[in-house]
Amino acid sequence: MENILSPSLLAADFGKAAQQLKEIEAVGTQYIHLDVMDGMFVPNISFGIPVIQSLRKDTDMIFDVHLMIVEPERYIEAFRKAGADIINFHVEATKNPKEVLSKIKQTGAKTGITIKPKTPVCEIVPYLKDVDMVLVMTVEPGFGGQKFMAEQMQKVEELAKIRKQEGLLFDIEVDGGVDLTNVEKVLQAGANVIVAGSAVFGAEDIAKRAKEFLKILQEKKT
């Protein structure tokens, strides 16, 4: 499994977003994590389709779109057209996860499913054969800069075990409070896609910080 850094745009300076994307892309960052919040599923509003569409012109990075919205099935096609490469939705946000996964597949995007800290892995087991990525939240979704919940690594370990036992190939992504002090523990638990928001975009030199993450990810490659 390739280890991948997916910095969260939520922590970027939106007045310099295009420039900052170029800076992290230039040092080898492959993904950019795009948190879409509707103010209903989570108590915050971020950005939506027009911003993603606008940024798509400025970078070739993989758009790792994390939908924190109710009834995500309503907007799958629109986010794909805007430039999403991976569309990740919350199992808690829809009554029909299979329908959402089917809609994502129909667009040609990669499929992702997400669980909040209080949601057990068993809630998504029925869908694991149909996903390209599972996202484990290590903070309560809605706001950046929260403290990393180390106990969520048990879910990562459980997912890695299921993946191996069932011969599946889905990526395991971790989002929330990941920084240079805990990223190795996240990788050791079995995750291979690392979301880092403030830890990258909050640095004085974001390109240097991205390189530091990428170095660790490369060294821990399995």
Image: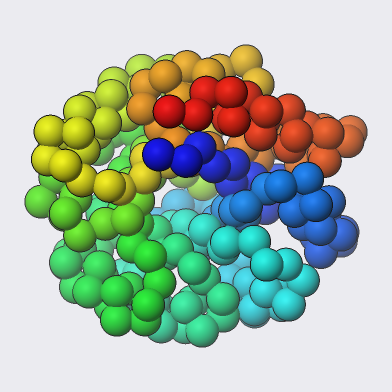
**Quarter residue 46 falls in:** bottom right
Quadrant assignment for the N terminus: top left
* 7, above or below 204, in the image: below
* Residue at figure coordinates x 28%, y 24% from the top left: 157
* 131, above or below 3, in the image: below
The reply, left or right, for residue 34 in relation to residue 157 is right
* Residue at figure coordinates x 81%, y 64% from the top left: 18
Percent across and percent down for residue 174 are 45, 36
Q: Do we see residue 217 in this rendering? A: yes
Colour approach in the figure? rainbow
Quadrant assignment for the C terminus: top left
* Residue at figure coordinates x 59%, y 41% from the top left: 5
Percent across and percent down for residue 42 are 45, 52
Percent across and percent down for residue 177 are 56, 29
**Quarter residue 145 falls in:** top right
* 49, above or below 110, in the image: below
Q: Do we see residue 145 in this rendering? A: no
**Depth check, front residue: 69 or 148:** 148
